[in-house]
Image (spheres, grey):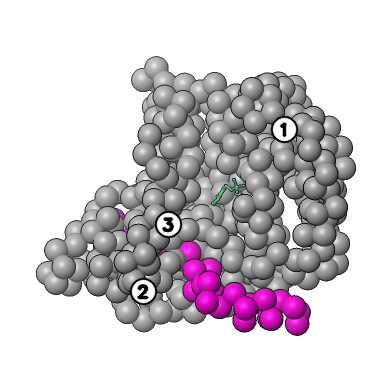
Amino acid sequence: MTVSATLAANEAIAARRAAGQEVLALGFGEAGIPVHPLLSQRLVQAAGQIAYGPVAGIEPAREAAAGYWSRRGIPTDASQVLLGPGSKPLLFALLHAAEGEVVLPAPAWVSYAAQSHLLGREPIRVPVPDGEGGVPDAALMDAAVREARAAGRDPRIVVVTLPDNPTGRLASEESVQALCETARELDLVIVADEIYRDLVFKDVAFPSPAKWAPERTVTTTALSKNYALGGWRVGAARFPDSDLGRRLQESVRGIASEIWSSTPMPMQHAAAYAWSDPAELVERVAMARRLHGSVAKAVAEVFAAVGCEVRAPQGGFYVWPDFSPLRAVLAERWGATTSADLARVLLDEFGVVVIRGDAFGDAPEALTVRVAVTGIYGESDSERLAALVSNE
Ligand code: PLP
Protein backbone atom coordinates (compact mmCIF):
# COMPACT_ATOMS: atom_id res chain seq x y z
CA MET A 1 0.00 0.00 0.00
CA THR A 2 1.13 3.54 -0.69
CA VAL A 3 -0.14 6.61 1.16
CA SER A 4 -3.42 8.00 -0.22
CA ALA A 5 -2.84 10.56 -3.04
CA THR A 6 -4.62 13.25 -1.07
CA LEU A 7 -2.60 12.70 2.12
CA ALA A 8 0.61 12.45 0.09
CA ALA A 9 -0.14 15.90 -1.35
CA ASN A 10 -0.35 17.23 2.21
CA GLU A 11 3.13 15.92 2.90
CA ALA A 12 4.49 17.64 -0.24
CA ILE A 13 2.97 20.91 0.97
CA ALA A 14 4.53 20.61 4.42
CA ALA A 15 7.97 19.95 2.87
CA ARG A 16 7.73 23.01 0.59
CA ARG A 17 6.53 25.28 3.36
CA ALA A 18 9.34 24.05 5.61
CA ALA A 19 11.74 25.07 2.81
CA GLY A 20 10.22 28.58 2.87
CA GLN A 21 8.31 28.28 -0.43
CA GLU A 22 4.80 29.64 -0.86
CA VAL A 23 2.17 27.07 -1.70
CA LEU A 24 -1.52 27.37 -2.51
CA ALA A 25 -2.87 24.08 -1.16
CA LEU A 26 -5.88 23.02 -3.21
CA GLY A 27 -5.31 19.30 -2.79
CA PHE A 28 -6.85 17.96 0.39
CA GLY A 29 -10.64 17.92 0.86
CA GLU A 30 -10.81 19.84 4.13
CA ALA A 31 -14.07 21.72 4.67
CA GLY A 32 -12.29 24.75 6.13
CA ILE A 33 -15.07 26.23 8.32
CA PRO A 34 -14.45 26.98 12.03
CA VAL A 35 -16.22 24.75 14.55
CA HIS A 36 -19.50 26.06 15.95
CA PRO A 37 -19.12 26.84 19.70
CA LEU A 38 -22.28 24.89 20.52
CA LEU A 39 -20.71 21.77 19.07
CA SER A 40 -17.50 22.28 21.04
CA GLN A 41 -19.61 22.64 24.18
CA ARG A 42 -21.27 19.26 23.61
CA LEU A 43 -17.89 17.68 23.07
CA VAL A 44 -16.39 19.14 26.24
CA GLN A 45 -19.44 18.21 28.32
CA ALA A 46 -18.93 14.58 27.27
CA ALA A 47 -15.14 14.55 27.78
CA GLY A 48 -15.50 12.44 30.93
CA GLN A 49 -16.96 9.56 28.93
CA ILE A 50 -13.83 7.48 28.75
CA ALA A 51 -15.24 3.96 28.54
CA TYR A 52 -15.67 2.03 25.32
CA GLY A 53 -19.17 2.36 23.93
CA PRO A 54 -21.54 0.01 22.11
CA VAL A 55 -20.15 -1.15 18.74
CA ALA A 56 -23.09 0.27 16.76
CA GLY A 57 -22.98 3.63 18.53
CA ILE A 58 -24.79 5.23 21.46
CA GLU A 59 -28.58 5.35 21.28
CA PRO A 60 -28.93 9.18 21.23
CA ALA A 61 -26.56 9.44 18.25
CA ARG A 62 -28.29 6.60 16.37
CA GLU A 63 -31.69 8.22 17.10
CA ALA A 64 -30.38 11.58 15.89
CA ALA A 65 -28.96 10.10 12.69
CA ALA A 66 -32.32 8.36 12.08
CA GLY A 67 -34.03 11.75 12.50
CA TYR A 68 -31.51 13.39 10.15
CA TRP A 69 -32.34 10.92 7.37
CA SER A 70 -36.08 10.86 8.07
CA ARG A 71 -36.27 14.67 7.77
CA ARG A 72 -34.48 14.36 4.42
CA GLY A 73 -37.08 12.03 2.96
CA ILE A 74 -35.62 8.64 3.91
CA PRO A 75 -37.68 7.32 6.85
CA THR A 76 -35.25 5.64 9.22
CA ASP A 77 -35.41 3.85 12.56
CA ALA A 78 -32.47 4.08 14.96
CA SER A 79 -32.06 0.29 14.72
CA GLN A 80 -31.00 0.72 11.07
CA VAL A 81 -28.08 3.02 11.97
CA LEU A 82 -24.50 2.05 12.74
CA LEU A 83 -21.83 4.61 13.65
CA GLY A 84 -18.12 4.48 12.94
CA PRO A 85 -15.00 6.64 13.34
CA GLY A 86 -15.64 8.47 10.06
CA SER A 87 -17.41 7.07 7.04
CA LYS A 88 -14.16 5.82 5.50
CA PRO A 89 -13.86 2.76 7.77
CA LEU A 90 -17.59 2.14 7.38
CA LEU A 91 -17.17 2.11 3.59
CA PHE A 92 -14.27 -0.32 3.89
CA ALA A 93 -16.33 -2.59 6.15
CA LEU A 94 -19.20 -2.44 3.64
CA LEU A 95 -16.95 -3.44 0.74
CA HIS A 96 -15.65 -6.27 2.90
CA ALA A 97 -19.13 -7.38 3.97
CA ALA A 98 -20.42 -7.44 0.37
CA GLU A 99 -17.94 -10.29 -0.29
CA GLY A 100 -17.58 -9.50 -4.00
CA GLU A 101 -16.13 -7.02 -6.41
CA VAL A 102 -17.13 -3.37 -6.50
CA VAL A 103 -18.38 -1.29 -9.42
CA LEU A 104 -17.21 2.32 -9.30
CA PRO A 105 -18.04 5.39 -11.34
CA ALA A 106 -15.08 6.69 -13.37
CA PRO A 107 -13.84 9.03 -12.02
CA ALA A 108 -14.49 8.30 -8.33
CA TRP A 109 -13.07 9.33 -4.95
CA VAL A 110 -9.59 7.81 -4.47
CA SER A 111 -10.26 5.59 -1.49
CA TYR A 112 -12.95 3.29 -2.90
CA ALA A 113 -10.48 1.70 -5.32
CA ALA A 114 -7.67 1.65 -2.77
CA GLN A 115 -9.95 -0.07 -0.23
CA SER A 116 -10.98 -2.59 -2.85
CA HIS A 117 -7.32 -3.30 -3.58
CA LEU A 118 -6.75 -3.82 0.16
CA LEU A 119 -9.35 -6.57 -0.07
CA GLY A 120 -7.49 -8.06 -3.03
CA ARG A 121 -10.23 -7.14 -5.51
CA GLU A 122 -9.83 -5.13 -8.69
CA PRO A 123 -12.70 -2.60 -9.01
CA ILE A 124 -14.79 -2.47 -12.18
CA ARG A 125 -14.86 1.13 -13.40
CA VAL A 126 -17.80 2.40 -15.42
CA PRO A 127 -17.91 5.86 -17.06
CA VAL A 128 -20.48 8.36 -15.77
CA PRO A 129 -23.24 9.73 -18.04
CA ASP A 130 -21.96 12.65 -20.11
CA GLY A 131 -21.54 15.79 -18.02
CA GLU A 132 -22.57 14.10 -14.76
CA GLY A 133 -20.55 12.78 -11.84
CA GLY A 134 -20.69 10.20 -9.08
CA VAL A 135 -22.91 7.62 -10.75
CA PRO A 136 -21.99 4.89 -13.28
CA ASP A 137 -23.97 5.03 -16.51
CA ALA A 138 -26.67 2.35 -16.02
CA ALA A 139 -26.47 0.80 -19.52
CA LEU A 140 -22.66 0.68 -19.43
CA MET A 141 -22.79 -0.82 -15.94
CA ASP A 142 -25.19 -3.50 -17.12
CA ALA A 143 -22.80 -4.47 -19.93
CA ALA A 144 -19.70 -4.32 -17.70
CA VAL A 145 -21.22 -6.46 -14.94
CA ARG A 146 -22.55 -9.07 -17.35
CA GLU A 147 -19.19 -9.23 -19.09
CA ALA A 148 -17.37 -9.53 -15.76
CA ARG A 149 -19.70 -12.34 -14.64
CA ALA A 150 -19.25 -14.18 -17.94
CA ALA A 151 -15.51 -14.00 -17.28
CA GLY A 152 -15.97 -15.63 -13.86
CA ARG A 153 -15.78 -12.44 -11.77
CA ASP A 154 -18.25 -11.68 -8.98
CA PRO A 155 -19.33 -8.00 -8.78
CA ARG A 156 -21.81 -7.50 -5.92
CA ILE A 157 -21.77 -3.86 -4.95
CA VAL A 158 -21.83 -0.45 -6.65
CA VAL A 159 -20.81 2.84 -5.04
CA VAL A 160 -22.30 6.22 -5.94
CA THR A 161 -21.24 9.62 -4.57
CA LEU A 162 -23.91 12.32 -4.28
CA PRO A 163 -22.87 15.08 -4.81
CA ASP A 164 -19.61 13.91 -6.25
CA ASN A 165 -15.98 14.08 -5.27
CA PRO A 166 -14.01 14.72 -7.55
CA THR A 167 -16.29 16.29 -10.19
CA GLY A 168 -18.44 18.47 -7.92
CA ARG A 169 -21.47 17.37 -9.94
CA LEU A 170 -24.78 16.02 -8.63
CA ALA A 171 -26.09 13.10 -10.69
CA SER A 172 -29.53 13.60 -12.24
CA GLU A 173 -32.64 11.87 -10.87
CA GLU A 174 -32.99 10.00 -14.18
CA SER A 175 -29.45 8.60 -13.98
CA VAL A 176 -29.84 7.54 -10.34
CA GLN A 177 -33.24 5.97 -11.01
CA ALA A 178 -31.83 4.04 -13.99
CA LEU A 179 -28.90 2.92 -11.87
CA CYS A 180 -31.29 1.67 -9.16
CA GLU A 181 -33.30 -0.38 -11.66
CA THR A 182 -30.17 -1.89 -13.19
CA ALA A 183 -28.70 -2.65 -9.76
CA ARG A 184 -31.92 -4.48 -8.87
CA GLU A 185 -31.81 -6.52 -12.09
CA LEU A 186 -28.16 -7.38 -11.46
CA ASP A 187 -28.74 -7.95 -7.73
CA LEU A 188 -26.08 -5.44 -6.68
CA VAL A 189 -25.97 -3.70 -3.29
CA ILE A 190 -25.89 0.09 -3.71
CA VAL A 191 -23.73 2.19 -1.42
CA ALA A 192 -24.84 5.83 -1.56
CA ASP A 193 -22.02 7.97 -0.16
CA GLU A 194 -23.90 11.16 0.70
CA ILE A 195 -21.19 12.80 2.77
CA TYR A 196 -21.62 16.16 0.90
CA ARG A 197 -25.40 15.98 0.86
CA ASP A 198 -26.10 19.20 2.79
CA LEU A 199 -23.68 21.14 0.58
CA VAL A 200 -25.72 21.09 -2.65
CA PHE A 201 -25.76 24.69 -3.90
CA LYS A 202 -29.23 24.85 -5.46
CA ASP A 203 -32.46 23.76 -3.85
CA VAL A 204 -33.08 20.65 -5.97
CA ALA A 205 -34.76 17.30 -5.20
CA PHE A 206 -31.93 15.19 -3.84
CA PRO A 207 -31.56 11.94 -5.84
CA SER A 208 -31.05 9.45 -2.99
CA PRO A 209 -30.94 5.87 -4.32
CA ALA A 210 -32.71 4.81 -1.08
CA LYS A 211 -35.88 6.33 -2.59
CA TRP A 212 -35.91 4.01 -5.62
CA ALA A 213 -34.04 0.96 -4.33
CA PRO A 214 -34.91 0.97 -0.61
CA GLU A 215 -34.33 -2.76 -0.20
CA ARG A 216 -30.67 -2.66 -1.35
CA THR A 217 -29.26 0.80 -0.62
CA VAL A 218 -26.88 1.51 2.24
CA THR A 219 -26.50 5.27 2.74
CA THR A 220 -23.52 6.85 4.49
CA THR A 221 -22.89 10.28 5.96
CA ALA A 222 -20.45 11.89 8.41
CA LEU A 223 -19.72 15.06 10.35
CA SER A 224 -16.61 15.64 8.20
CA LYS A 225 -17.89 17.76 5.32
CA ASN A 226 -21.33 19.19 6.16
CA TYR A 227 -20.17 20.33 9.61
CA ALA A 228 -16.45 20.66 8.72
CA LEU A 229 -15.42 18.21 11.47
CA GLY A 230 -13.19 15.75 9.60
CA GLY A 231 -10.81 15.43 12.54
CA TRP A 232 -13.55 14.45 14.96
CA ARG A 233 -14.01 11.19 13.07
CA VAL A 234 -17.70 10.36 13.21
CA GLY A 235 -19.63 8.73 10.39
CA ALA A 236 -22.86 6.79 10.10
CA ALA A 237 -24.33 4.14 7.83
CA ARG A 238 -28.04 3.57 7.31
CA PHE A 239 -28.92 -0.01 6.37
CA PRO A 240 -32.05 -1.03 4.46
CA ASP A 241 -35.01 -2.46 6.34
CA SER A 242 -34.72 -5.80 4.49
CA ASP A 243 -33.14 -9.22 5.04
CA LEU A 244 -30.22 -8.10 2.89
CA GLY A 245 -29.87 -4.93 4.97
CA ARG A 246 -29.91 -6.80 8.29
CA ARG A 247 -27.35 -9.33 7.04
CA LEU A 248 -25.01 -6.58 5.88
CA GLN A 249 -25.48 -4.63 9.11
CA GLU A 250 -24.62 -7.67 11.25
CA SER A 251 -21.53 -8.30 9.16
CA VAL A 252 -20.37 -4.67 9.36
CA ARG A 253 -21.00 -4.71 13.12
CA GLY A 254 -18.80 -7.81 13.39
CA ILE A 255 -16.02 -6.16 11.38
CA ALA A 256 -16.37 -2.99 13.46
CA SER A 257 -16.11 -4.97 16.69
CA GLU A 258 -12.76 -6.38 15.58
CA ILE A 259 -11.31 -3.20 14.10
CA TRP A 260 -12.46 -0.04 15.88
CA SER A 261 -14.56 -1.44 18.79
CA SER A 262 -16.55 1.76 19.17
CA THR A 263 -16.71 5.32 17.92
CA PRO A 264 -15.11 7.92 20.26
CA MET A 265 -17.74 8.66 22.90
CA PRO A 266 -17.48 12.47 23.28
CA MET A 267 -17.71 12.87 19.50
CA GLN A 268 -20.85 10.77 19.41
CA HIS A 269 -22.50 13.22 21.81
CA ALA A 270 -21.55 16.09 19.53
CA ALA A 271 -22.91 14.08 16.59
CA ALA A 272 -26.21 13.48 18.43
CA TYR A 273 -26.53 17.24 18.71
CA ALA A 274 -25.50 17.99 15.11
CA TRP A 275 -27.81 15.41 13.54
CA SER A 276 -30.79 16.75 15.47
CA ASP A 277 -30.62 19.77 13.10
CA PRO A 278 -30.66 22.60 15.68
CA ALA A 279 -31.36 25.98 14.03
CA GLU A 280 -27.87 27.37 14.79
CA LEU A 281 -26.14 24.52 12.99
CA VAL A 282 -28.58 24.47 10.10
CA GLU A 283 -27.70 28.16 9.58
CA ARG A 284 -23.98 27.40 9.88
CA VAL A 285 -24.22 24.68 7.22
CA ALA A 286 -26.23 27.07 5.00
CA MET A 287 -23.45 29.65 5.37
CA ALA A 288 -20.81 27.06 4.45
CA ARG A 289 -22.89 25.99 1.45
CA ARG A 290 -23.13 29.61 0.20
CA LEU A 291 -19.41 30.16 0.69
CA HIS A 292 -18.34 26.92 -1.04
CA GLY A 293 -20.85 27.56 -3.82
CA SER A 294 -19.67 31.06 -4.63
CA VAL A 295 -15.96 30.21 -4.39
CA ALA A 296 -16.34 27.03 -6.47
CA LYS A 297 -18.21 28.98 -9.15
CA ALA A 298 -15.49 31.66 -9.25
CA VAL A 299 -12.73 29.04 -9.41
CA ALA A 300 -14.47 27.18 -12.25
CA GLU A 301 -14.74 30.49 -14.14
CA VAL A 302 -10.99 31.05 -13.77
CA PHE A 303 -10.21 27.64 -15.27
CA ALA A 304 -12.71 28.26 -18.09
CA ALA A 305 -11.12 31.65 -18.78
CA VAL A 306 -7.67 30.10 -19.33
CA GLY A 307 -9.15 27.59 -21.78
CA CYS A 308 -9.99 24.49 -19.71
CA GLU A 309 -13.20 22.54 -20.13
CA VAL A 310 -15.01 22.69 -16.81
CA ARG A 311 -18.60 22.06 -15.71
CA ALA A 312 -20.27 24.27 -13.15
CA PRO A 313 -19.89 22.70 -9.69
CA GLN A 314 -23.21 21.76 -8.07
CA GLY A 315 -22.25 20.72 -4.56
CA GLY A 316 -19.39 20.01 -2.14
CA PHE A 317 -16.20 21.99 -2.67
CA TYR A 318 -14.41 20.57 -5.69
CA VAL A 319 -13.81 21.69 -9.25
CA TRP A 320 -12.64 19.27 -11.93
CA PRO A 321 -11.05 21.14 -14.83
CA ASP A 322 -9.99 19.29 -17.95
CA PHE A 323 -6.90 20.80 -19.58
CA SER A 324 -7.19 18.83 -22.85
CA PRO A 325 -7.82 21.97 -24.95
CA LEU A 326 -4.36 23.12 -23.76
CA ARG A 327 -2.70 19.78 -24.56
CA ALA A 328 -0.40 21.19 -27.26
CA VAL A 329 0.91 24.07 -25.18
CA LEU A 330 1.40 21.89 -22.09
CA ALA A 331 3.39 19.36 -24.09
CA GLU A 332 5.45 21.96 -25.92
CA ARG A 333 6.23 24.28 -23.05
CA TRP A 334 6.61 21.82 -20.16
CA GLY A 335 6.65 18.35 -21.70
CA ALA A 336 3.42 17.59 -19.80
CA THR A 337 1.32 14.83 -21.37
CA THR A 338 -0.37 13.22 -18.36
CA SER A 339 -2.37 14.40 -15.35
CA ALA A 340 0.64 13.54 -13.16
CA ASP A 341 2.83 15.84 -15.30
CA LEU A 342 0.16 18.52 -15.16
CA ALA A 343 -0.05 18.40 -11.36
CA ARG A 344 3.75 18.61 -11.21
CA VAL A 345 3.83 21.66 -13.53
CA LEU A 346 1.14 23.41 -11.48
CA LEU A 347 3.20 22.83 -8.34
CA ASP A 348 6.70 23.52 -9.70
CA GLU A 349 5.83 26.50 -11.91
CA PHE A 350 2.91 28.06 -10.05
CA GLY A 351 3.11 26.76 -6.46
CA VAL A 352 -0.42 25.31 -6.67
CA VAL A 353 -1.18 21.87 -5.24
CA VAL A 354 -3.99 19.90 -6.87
CA ILE A 355 -4.63 16.17 -7.14
CA ARG A 356 -3.85 14.43 -10.44
CA GLY A 357 -6.91 13.06 -12.21
CA ASP A 358 -5.56 9.54 -12.61
CA ALA A 359 -5.69 9.14 -8.81
CA PHE A 360 -9.48 9.10 -9.28
CA GLY A 361 -9.33 6.45 -11.99
CA ASP A 362 -9.11 8.73 -15.04
CA ALA A 363 -6.79 7.53 -17.81
CA PRO A 364 -3.23 8.81 -17.13
CA GLU A 365 -3.24 10.89 -20.33
CA ALA A 366 -6.57 12.56 -19.47
CA LEU A 367 -5.46 16.05 -18.44
CA THR A 368 -7.81 16.38 -15.46
CA VAL A 369 -7.05 17.54 -11.92
CA ARG A 370 -9.14 17.89 -8.78
CA VAL A 371 -9.15 21.28 -7.14
CA ALA A 372 -10.37 21.56 -3.52
CA VAL A 373 -11.46 25.19 -3.43
CA THR A 374 -11.58 25.40 0.36
CA GLY A 375 -7.76 25.65 0.28
CA ILE A 376 -8.31 29.23 -0.87
CA TYR A 377 -9.79 30.11 2.54
CA GLY A 378 -6.35 29.10 3.80
CA GLU A 379 -4.78 29.27 7.21
CA SER A 380 -4.06 32.98 6.92
CA ASP A 381 -7.72 33.66 6.33
CA SER A 382 -9.08 31.68 9.25
CA GLU A 383 -9.61 34.80 11.39
CA ARG A 384 -11.56 36.50 8.63
CA LEU A 385 -13.59 33.36 8.13
CA ALA A 386 -14.25 33.06 11.86
CA ALA A 387 -15.45 36.69 11.84
CA LEU A 388 -17.67 35.96 8.89
CA VAL A 389 -19.31 32.97 10.52
CA SER A 390 -19.70 34.74 13.85
CA ASN A 391 -21.71 37.44 12.02
CA GLU A 392 -23.91 34.94 10.32
N1 PLP B 1 -16.49 9.83 0.96
C1 PLP B 1 -16.07 10.86 0.21
C2 PLP B 1 -16.66 11.04 -1.15
C3 PLP B 1 -15.08 11.72 0.68
O1 PLP B 1 -14.67 12.74 -0.08
C4 PLP B 1 -14.51 11.49 1.96
C5 PLP B 1 -13.43 12.34 2.48
O2 PLP B 1 -12.71 12.98 1.77
C6 PLP B 1 -15.00 10.40 2.70
C7 PLP B 1 -15.99 9.61 2.18
C8 PLP B 1 -14.46 10.03 4.04
O3 PLP B 1 -14.77 10.90 5.01
P1 PLP B 1 -14.77 10.56 6.57
O4 PLP B 1 -14.02 9.30 6.79
O5 PLP B 1 -14.12 11.74 7.19
O6 PLP B 1 -16.21 10.41 6.95
The quarter of the displayed image where residue 310 is located: bottom left
Of residues 258 and 222, the one nearer the viewer is: 258
Mark 2 lies on a secondary structure that is loop
Compared to residue 342, the image places residue 122 above or below, namely above
Mark 3 lies on a secondary structure that is helix
Residue 223 lies left or right of residue 280; in this view the side is: left
Q: Give, as a three-letter code, the residue at label 2.
A: Glu
Of residues 58 and 123, the one nearer the viewer is: 58
Residue 112 drawn at (x, y percent): 49, 40
Q: Give, as a three-letter code, the residue at label 3.
A: Asn
The quarter of the displayed image where residue 276 is located: bottom right
Instruction: State yes or no: residue 294 in magenta.
Output: no
Using a 10 Å C-alpha cutoff, classify the residue at mark 2 as few (fewer than 14 neighbours), some (14 to 19) or many (20 or more).
Answer: few
Residue 326 drawn at (x, y percent): 24, 71
Residue 54 drawn at (x, y percent): 79, 30
Which numbered disc flags the more N-terminal residue, 2 or 3?
3
Residue positioned 69% across, 28% down in the render: 261
Asked if the residue at tag 3 contacts the one at tag 2, i.e. Cβ–Cβ closer than 8 Å, the answer is: no
Using a 10 Å C-alpha cutoff, classify the residue at mark 1 as few (fewer than 14 neighbours), some (14 to 19) or many (20 or more).
Answer: many
The quarter of the displayed image where residue 251 is located: top right
Residue bearing the label numbered 3:
10
Residue bearing the label numbered 1:
262
Q: Which residues are magenta?
A: 366-392
Which numbered disc flags the more N-terminal residue, 2 or 1?
2
Using a 10 Å C-alpha cutoff, classify the residue at mark 3 as few (fewer than 14 neighbours), some (14 to 19) or many (20 or more).
Answer: some
C-alpha span from label 3 to label 1 = 28 Å
Instruction: State yes or no: residue 390 in magenta.
Output: yes
Residue positioned 78% across, 50% down in the render: 271
Which numbered disc flags the more N-terminal residue, 3 or 1?
3
Residue bearing the label numbered 2:
22
